[in-house]
Image (cartoon, helix red, strand yellow):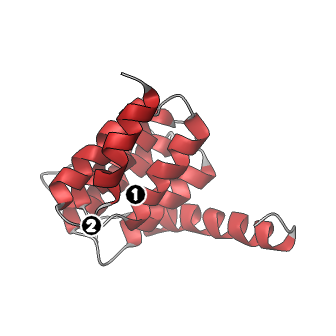
Amino acid sequence: MSYEVIVAGLAPIALNPGNEKTRGSAIRQLLDYLETTHSDLVDARIAISLHSKDEESRTTAISMLSIDFLESRDRRIGAVIARVVKDESASIDLRIFAYINLIDVSGRSTSEYPSLGAFQFPSDVDWNFVDQYVSAGQEKEEGHKGDGSN
């Protein structure tokens, strides 16, 4: 099956705001298929992580970003994931998941993972750690505004 046929079949489903589960599945299939263009794929995963109304799709996108950037200390990816941790409109489960994935991207020791049995969100979150990544993302955005590269 050609690239064009697969994308033509899945794209309308992925963009349709109707059934969120079907949409999420189509997005995941598209993301899996489109791994040939990594920077575009990263941008798509970032957009889904931040803007999808389907939390399962957001979880998948965050997970894939974390896998791609495991222990990379990438400030851009960390900033995206940190924004999800701070997103009060997201479920607690998604925010905890994002926090764990932020630790993965940051390269912190696995000993710093929260003990999920005793972990209390938001009181047990290291907010200084999260805010460092949010601040780094804001600095990058402001830097682009000043250099004309938006």
Q: Is residue 35 left or right of residue 142?
A: left
- Indicate the quadrant containing the N terminus: top left, top right, bottom left or bottom right: top left
Residue 119 shows in the view: no
Between 108 and 22, the one lying in front of the other is 22
Residue 60 shows in the view: yes
Residue 101: where, in percent of width, then height? 38, 47
Residue 15's mark? none
Q: Residue at x 32, y 78 (%)?
A: 88
Residue 14: where, in percent of width, then height? 32, 53
User: Compared with residue 77, is residue 150 higher up or lower down, i.e. above or below?
Assistant: below
Amino acid type at mark 2: Pro
C-alpha distance separating marks 1 and 2 = 16 Å
In the picture, residue 85 is in which quadrant?
bottom left
Residue 72: where, in percent of width, then height? 57, 37
Between 25 and 132, the one lying in front of the other is 25
User: Compared with residue 117, is residue 72 higher up or lower down, i.e. above or below?
Assistant: above
Residue 17's mark? 2
Q: Residue at x 54, y 60 (%)?
A: 79
Q: Residue furthest right?
A: 147
Q: Residue at x 19, y 60 (%)?
A: 20
Residue 118: where, in percent of width, then height? 15, 56
Residue 49's mark? 1
In the picture, residue 133 is in which quadrant?
bottom right
Q: Residues within 10 Å of mark 2 (few under 14, many from 20)?
A: some
User: Compared with residue 29, is residue 127 higher up or lower down, i.e. above or below?
Assistant: below
Q: Helix, strand, or loop for circle 2?
A: loop
Q: Helix, strand, or loop for circle 1?
A: helix
